[in-house]
Amino acid sequence: MNWINAIAQGLLLGGLYALFACGLSLLFGVVGIINLAHGDLAVLGGYVAVAILPSVHTNALWALLFVPPIFGAFGYVSQRTLLQRSLENGPLTTLLVTFGLSVVLQNALLEGFSADSHSLSIGKLATQALRINSQLSISYLRFGILVVAVVVLAGVQLLLARTSVGRQIRAVADDNEAAAISGVNTRHIAGIATGIAFVTVAIAGLANGMYSQFTPTSGSSLLLFAFEAVIIGGLGSLWGTLAGGCVLGLAGTIGAQIDSTMGTLIPHLVFLAVLAVRPSGFFPARAPA
Amino acid sequence: MTQAPTAPAAPVAAVRIRRSTRTSRWALGPTAIILIVLGYLPYGTGQGTTSMLVDFFILLTLGVTWNMLAGYAGLVSVGQQAYIGIGAYGVLWLAQHGVEPFLALPIAAVACAVLAVPISFLVFRLRGGYFAIGTWVVAEVLALFTIRDSALGGGTGTNVPGLGGFDPVVLGAYTYWAALAVAVISLVGSYFLLRTRVGLALTAVRDDETAARNVGVRVSRAKRIVYLAAAVGAGGAGALLAISQLNVEPHNVYGVQWSAYMIFVVLIGGIGTLEGPILGTIVFFVLQRTLASEGAWYLIIVGSVAVVMAVWVRKGLWGIAERFGLRLFPTGYHVTDTTR
């Protein structure tokens, strides 16, 4: 890998991080939940595909048709039952509950699928790439993930800005009580927002499964990268999140280029540096989610 | 005791301010007896019991100090394993440089507090859940730095030198007493810390942070003191881990599972009380021992119990006991009108 290639791969990887971060940001911005089980939910999405795919199709792209809707419903239900209840106990409770869920999920996956790594096969597409020159080639899969990330981020942005549901979601995010007084069914709206967040988590989990292998415990590092992308980009800004993801991706591939063991350390250090110098991130926005 | 607040308008003689309760005074005797028995234990029982209790004391120390962070200061940290790791590797490094491991234990714990000062300035920029994940990132970074040092065993860890010269029975007993001391110090330490102005400040913050700031409570300072104290506790626990296991393994000491254990202990026992973590540690420990053969199921069960407790039984098991007026380590003030 040369430098130009490292930069290109880093930017592409940023799409995956941004995809992960989108759900985290949405859930916190609208519902007020910091979901510590975020990464594990994404991994769960991968395993749902592993479990169901054999009876559907050999190509994992088909999982995009059924895993996100399942997760959407799952998100709505878990918001209306467990998460809403824990929100009423205060913000600290939701942290503890989601952390507990994360441990339960990880161990349930360990019990069900063993600690072996799995991956989602998408056939020939996984290895095909657009060769620009002898040193730079862009994998269709990675490019596809970046495109999906942009589409998902734009979709969420449009949904929030243009639709009636989006207006209600923003109202709930701004002032829950005022929204309720104006006739918004706030719990239903919070459920829908959680459902949307879970759909993006599922897409991110599937993309991750196609991109690399995953184990029941790989959720933790996914959570950390998603969180770092949100903070670097600036809270509340979806496009900032994409930029944050790209910064992390670049830091990772450039770090790995310097020394193969630095691939995970450098992004964390970049995050801590941003936190020290510019804690509000680079593109903080006042618009919700 | 020392700093009963000046009663504002009411005549001083009309109220009596007590910091202890009847049960707390009654509990002093049995507590002393339990401590004496625990201290004498290595003479009376075998290695199996004492080494099991070492694990118990490590867990207790972690639970007590995490409860201080989350239950009193509202700082939900998921990164205390940073200090467990530094404590363990501190002992390893000092032992490699000729310091007796048992002397290295307090040094490593204090080193954790020193390290926690700059870290606190970084992570205190984050609020609530972001603070939680930020502390986790710090722990990851420290772990990644540690495994880069091949003298410390790199990614696989290494043995702690300086413990081979001990007779196994003597070493077991020393380790046990060290663990007992760490657990007792963290319990007594957090009890007295929470009874000082810091504890008072934290109570004010818990009730209404804005109001507390307005009347001049130094909120960040109080939180920082608790954060440093919790770092010392986790560091001590990590140092004990290194001594009791005779080696240090990075994925163990820096593992996020420690945060899970702390949180479960506190949630089950009852957050925001000193008695809760003790009860929680006992329950967690029994569950861990009985379900150990079930593999991953034990964390599924314990995790689910903790989630249920967090949502539906917010004050944990000790909260149930408190409904009957039981309080062993009161940290608040009890004002009674003596004119009636």
Image (cartoon, rainbow, N blue to C red):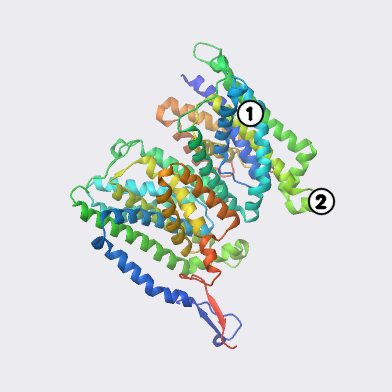
Q: Quadrant of residue B11?
A: bottom right
Residue B165 position in % (x across, y down) = 18, 49
View extreme (right): residue: A182
Mark linked to residue B254 = none
Q: Quadrant of residue B46?
A: bottom left
Residue B218 position in % (x across, y down) = 53, 63
From the viewer's perspective, tell me whether residue B42 is left or right of residue B113.
left
Mark linked to residue A182 = 2
Disc 1 crowd rating (10 Å Cα; few below 14, some 14-19, many 20+) is many
Disc 2 crowd rating (10 Å Cα; few below 14, some 14-19, many 20+) is few
Residue B3 position in % (x across, y down) = 47, 76
Residue A242: in sight, yes or no? no
**Nearer to me, B286 or A61:** B286
Give the structural element (helix, strand or loop) at label 1. Answer: helix
From the viewer's perspective, tell me whether residue B327 is left or right of residue B146.
right
The chain to which mark 1 is attached is A
Q: Earlier in the sequence, mark 1 or mark 2?
A: 1
Give the structural element (helix, strand or loop) at label 2. Answer: loop
- Label 2 is placed on what type of residue? Ser
Residue B72 position in % (x across, y down) = 52, 61
- Marks 1, 2 in one chain: yes
Q: Residue at x 37, y 47 (%)?
A: B86
- Label 1 is placed on what type of residue? Ala
Q: Residue at x 44, y 59 (%)?
A: B64
Q: Quadrant of residue A236?
A: top right
The chain to which mark 2 is attached is A
Give the residue pinned by disc 1: A149
Asked if marks 1 and 2 touch (Cβ < 8 Å), the reply is no
Separation of marks 1 and 2 at Cα, in angstroms: 34 Å
Q: The C terminus of chain A lies in which quarter of the figure?
A: top right
